[in-house]
Image (cartoon, rainbow, N blue to C red):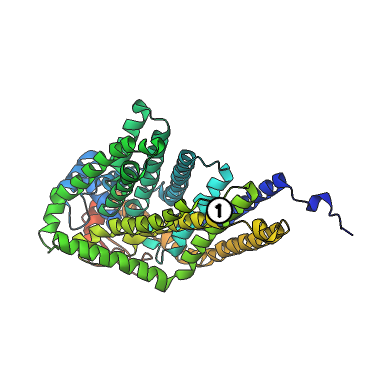
Amino acid sequence: MKIKLPSLLVFNEQKQKVLFILVLGVCTIFLFLPLFFHMYAGSFMRLSGDDYCYGGTQAQYGFWEGQWYAYQNIGRLYLGDRYSLNLAEAIFNLFVPKIYPVFLGAGIILWTVSLFFFLYQLTKYMGYQLHFLELFFLSASLLFFTLYVTSDLSQTLYWVSGMATYLYPLIFIDFLLGLIFWAARSFNPAIHIPLIFLTAFVGGGFSETTAVLQLGCIILIVLWAGLIGRQKKQKGLFIPAMIAFIPTCGSILLLVLSPSTQDRLTVSNHPSAIETLYLTIKFTAAFFYHVVKDSPFPYFLIALLGIFYSHIKKVIYKIANENKKSFFQIGWIGLACFFLVAASVAPSAYGQNAYPGERALFPARFVTVILLMWFGYRVGSFIPSPESIFGERSKWLVHIISLVFAFGICTYAVRATSPISAQFPKFQKWAYYWDLRDQQIRQDKQNGILNIHVMYLDHVIYDVVELTPDPSDGYNKCAERYYKVDSISADLPGWDR
């Protein structure tokens, strides 16, 4: 005797698709939750360390002349060769202090939008039909895991100079790649040439690390289009990629040939080309070694998420298995990941002759997360559907396992908010006393007091120096120029009360 299930429990193809999208939507909300916590923590962001120096140069020389002066002369106190970073800091300083609470939030929103744009253009180019909630889910997943696997986010997220150096160029790279794939589908010279050229040029001027990474992405696209791609569709990538290649190379030359860079290079020894290549490969291997040794589970979860997403989508939408020839793409993904990580660590190998610091590894982690999820997606597309092996009833098992996995992802995202919220009290305290100190300096200046003594504040961002009791300290001198006073000494008590 067969038991007839109620109609609500009978999942036809349409109901399965609706459930799939709803589950992805719920997961997206939970994955964005830690990002909102980061945005709230970032609302307590204030000036620290190099921020005073960028602001001081602008206060002394003006908006445009200050950027030119930094590019020409400043290479040791901070890196003035980074012309896009100089511009971003100059714009930021036009609106301080009102822009403080929204700076990080704007960065995360722009990063989400640019990543969504890139994924949308990539999937359209490849012929995939994705619901907009799927694109938001993928964007949220990539952002969440990139931030989660980064061991120290304070310099990258909560420090203006660090965020503008390593996070903002990723926004430009995502947008640039989206423009390239858009142009490959329907090239319009009047729109795409200026957009691609300007995006590549500005994006390449934030830091040497991300400029070489951007160049690496373009080289891979050119190789895919020119050497590997045989279809007309892949050949269409070549022209927009070459349009991006020229300003990217130009931006790297501007960074390297800056007088401030040349001045900095004269005081340190740098390896030869062969030694730089050896160190780059060594540091890249060390990066992946630490990935496996220090935090294997999150990276494994990233690949597993790609497998689940791909396989469930294939089962629900009845997508055929990939052919065996496509299996070799998995190997290409691994090589691409190694190449792009090597591109991002190469500037540290040459410029510092040392393994990159955590904030300089942020772009490499982003690349690894993206390609690991793509690896998982490709693996999932080769796994045969359970119903082809065990019959139609196995669909229920697949749905149950998928819901359990989705619940696990949501739980994982909620747990990730705990260490972020633990920083709130200290950030709030620091922002409160920083604002009081800022008001005191401005009030003293207005009253004609130009040799100012203020409260000493603890630094809340790792390895970023605060103002010190010594008025001759480099950052105190930068703050002196920023506020246009004679001297500043952070020697008064109050932080510990």
User: Looking at this view, is 429 or 175 the one in front?
Assistant: 175
Q: Position of residue 343 (x, y in %)?
A: 28, 56
Q: Position of residue 68 (x, y in %)?
A: 19, 42
**Residue sitting farthest toward the left:** 266
Q: Residue at x 61, y 50 (%)?
A: 25
Q: Note whether residue 437 is visible.
A: no
Q: Which structural element holds mark 1?
A: helix
- Image quadrant holding the N terminus, namely bottom right
**Residue sitting farthest toward the top:** 190
- Image quadrant holding the C terminus, namely bottom left
Above or below for 319 versus 49 = above
Q: Residue at x 40, y 68 (%)?
A: 291
Q: Residue at x 63, y 62 (%)?
A: 407
Q: Position of residue 27 (x, y in %)?
A: 60, 55
Tell me the amino acid under the disc marked 1.
Ser
Q: Seen in the image, is 14 located left or right of residue 28?
A: right
User: Looking at this view, is 144 or 246 the one in front?
Assistant: 246
Q: Seen in the image, is 338 located left or right of residue 5?
A: left
User: Looking at this view, is 239 or 70 the one in front?
Assistant: 239
Q: Note whether residue 386 is visible.
A: yes
| Quadrant in the picture for residue 241 | top left
Above or below for 81 versus 178 = below
Q: Residue at x 26, y 56 (%)?
A: 479
**Residue topped by disc 1:** 310
Above or below for 355 versus 18 = below
User: Looking at this view, is 363 or 459 the one in front?
Assistant: 363
Q: Position of residue 469 (x, y in %)?
A: 26, 67
